[in-house]
Image: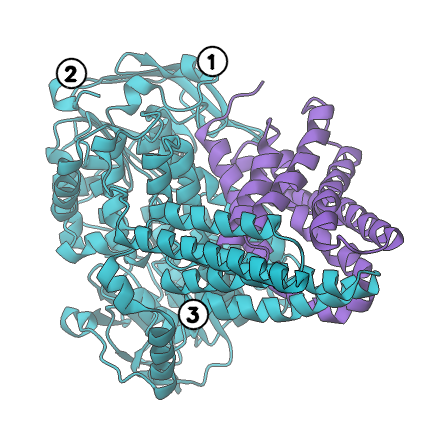
Chain colours: A cyan, B purple
Amino acid sequence: MPESQHSALPNIEIADLVWQPAGADAPTLDLRGSNIHVSAGETLMISGASGAGKSTLAAAIAGLLGTLLPGALRGTLHVGGVDLVAAAAEGAAGVPRELLGQLGFVAAGPAPRHALPRLLDDVALPLESRGVRAEFLAPRAQAAIASAGLPSNAAERDVASLSGGERAQAAVATALVSTPGLVIADEPLAGLDAKRAGALAALLMEQRATRVIVTHDVTQFGAATLRLHLDRGRVAEAPADRAEPPRAPVAQLVEQRGPVVLQLFAAASSARHGVGAVSATLHAGEMLLVRGETGSGKSTLLALAAGTLSADAGVRNVTASRIRYAPQDPGLLLGARSVQQLLLPEERGRAAEVAAALNVADLLDRPAARCSDGERRRLALVVTAAAEPDLLIADEPTLGLDDDAAARVSALLANLAVRGTAILVATHDSRLQVSHARELQHPEGTARAELLREAPIAERGVELARELLTPTPVKRLLGVSNPLTRFGLAAFWFLLSLISPATALAQGAVALPALIVAWSSGVQLISTLRLAAALAPAIFGMVLANLLGGATPEAAFGAGVRLLAFAAGSLVLLRPFEPLRLADAAMQHLRAPFAPTLTLLASAATLPPLMSEARERRAIRRLAKRGVDPLLLADLFDAAIRAVPHLATALEVRAVRLPSRLQPATALRPSRFGRADLLLILLSAGGLLFSVARVVIEAITMGS
Amino acid sequence: MRTWSLMHLVALSVIGITCGALFAGWNLIWGALTPLFALVLPLQYLLLAGTWVIAGPLAGLIIKRRGAALVGELIAASVSFLLASQWSIDALFSGAVQGLGAELVFALFGYRVWGWPVLILAGAASGVGMALHDLPLYFAGVDAGYAAALAAAMIASGALLGGGGVLLLHRALRRSGALGVIGA
């Protein structure tokens, strides 16, 4: 794949474009009567209110509509000479290849927009797809990460552990790493403080590329060649530029100090690394705006205040009886359902008032999953405000909202405070200004300090047991074994158990050496204990059931011990189960196809966040005292399936469909076999001899 | 035949992996309950075993493409194995035969009919797969009558949970609009 510096930049031709997503009853983008031409190297700036169709147009130009995302695309859309309407009509399975090679795409947040868990792997993925040689992969990815303004240690971190603003920087780094000729960025500066936003905007504007930038604030990008203002899916007259952001017309907060409703003193959670202890006090009727740099721990402070993140250091005193929390991702509160389904009967009237004030009254019956992000943000505020809480906590309540909607949110919060609600808000938004609101600057120095904490004795005990049960010295000496070796050996022990007679003796002779091999490969304590807990009653029950079913005691015990042998074989593989290493080994040694393997890997990586999200969702819902939810299982699948388009888009724009297989020279993480593999194989061979000898000796003694 | 886009691949893996996480939890519950049910093991199979076959019918019903049911159940089985299952690699073989059962039923109807009778049949066929695999391996020595009772329980549970349960889950997902976003 040629690098795009050497090829001509694409131009964009749009006329009478209409998009109707599958399952929708009306088009969400309708540009009939509009002609837009963007020459090579020009910048098209798309603005408009939330829900106006900005993201839809960006996705259309990227070639995602009708190809990856299902629906009907009509009209004219040529990008770099590729007819995207025709491609959609022909049922192309994704972005046309000619376009995919030169595309850099920043998807809209705050939905997850990464494909691989570790930042370095994720940023390097577009390069791997394009066949860049291995020795250039890490340096180029590191350079992209640094130029997006992320600290140097971020490369090794999980994208999920980055703050909302840092994730925005990471998304731009991934989009620009392959020096694309077409850069499409959907709200790339959302959630960033002013300084970082300015630097990132400059980075986007200095690329040699044709650019499409979606933003609610065009002033951040300086002069653009072309501007397009959308309103409810159509082109509209852009409002005149304003020199300074509008001030919200708000009810004046009276200087009042009610009783203290919340007190945090040096509170911290070990679940959030790199965020220091926080202290804050909040009175009834008071509004506290927490501002501070990207990644300084504002969301952590809010989650600690709400109690959805438990503080394991410091003090949290709460006298407020009714706390409501609108998290940065409104989906955690709303789930898949409509607002009406989340409200208690007595809250309905108040909810209707709040919804009218926020201009979302017609959305109360619509499933939240079908609303745009800006709409869901306001709906989350409707749900929280409808309960008339004593303490309302809102994380970035105006993120991605247009000026009018942001002013309405400011007014709502001010009105609630006047009624006596204590309000705690984290925000970057300079439009959110309420007179008499107290502002708290989250100071960089203390917030970034590493939290030093003496480990409790119980924890140290667990650590010691882990050391004893996991042979670390062996591992250090020999290195980590290849997942393929472990998989092969697990299969070997399984087959041996399968072909051995189902007697306790024969199966035991398989289980014992398998356990020793498992121990040498470094079994994981937690998994072992879990497996043992599941296994003991299972074996007991299996033997009992076989006896009751009329089997001879010998056959019954054999069936039980076979289960033990199976489990021992499975332990061989369990220890360092890292999906990434398994996928690398499969692609490099077994010639597994690139796109499906990475799809599986990226999906597997969503599992831990999905589980922690489920826990967080439960904690947030518990604030609303909704009790046990019969729809929890449907909710889990709903959240998983709703993540599919985001993940598919992330993989698609990283061009994983370009190569059919990974070339050895382009692998970022080479998968090798080493001494540890040899040791495991030798041990297994010894174990096999032991099993055979045990059975032979038994046969001889029985015969004599 | 319909083409597979990255969206379908991602949907298939996500469904399989979510089911696999569910299976891993179910393995623990199953193991803990076995002694209680040992006297009436067919009853445990009837009430609980069908949960292990939901991945195939669910993936088939949502993605409606050739191979989705088989691969979906296989992915789920792999995840349950990698998250530590007492059945070890055997989980993969179980997944293969159970997924194959559902896949064959969908293939029989040409991947065109997706009504409730087909789903019940697919769930029951997964149960047949479970019986064909489990009985010779774990219950080789039992009487014919007891084996028949176990097989009947597995098939009924497959139809009930793998067919009926999946239909209910699918309806909930359709209502919430989740299936709309992937165009299913």
* Spatial CA span between label 3 and label 2: 57 Å
Which image quadrant is residue A687 in?
A: bottom left
State left or right for residue B71 relative to residue A452: right
**Residue A548 shows which numbered tag?**
none
Q: Residues within 10 Å of mark 3 (few under 14, many from 20)?
A: some
Q: Which residue is the site of mark 3? A: A525
Kindly identify the amino acid type of the residue bearing the numbered disc 2.
Ala
Q: Position of residue A46 (x, y in %)?
A: 29, 32
Which of the pair A35/A623 is nearer the observer?
A623
Q: Residues within 10 Å of mark 2 (few under 14, many from 20)?
A: few
Residue type (three-letter) at the residue carrying disc 3 = Leu
Asked where in the image residue A654 lies, by quadrant, the reply is: top left
Q: Quadrant of the N terminus of chain A?
A: top left
For residue A8, which numbered disc appears in the image? 2
Tag 2 subunit: A
Indicate the secondary structure of the residue bearing disc 3.
helix
Q: Is residue A602 above or below residue A104?
A: below
Task: Give the amino acid type for the residue marked by disc 1 in the picture.
Answer: Glu
Mark 3 or mark 2, earlier in chain: 2
Circles 1 and 2: CB atoms closer than 8 Å = no
Q: Residue at x 52, y 35 (%)?
A: B182
Label 1 sits on residue = A90
Query: How far is mark 1 from mark 3, CA to CA?
Result: 53 Å
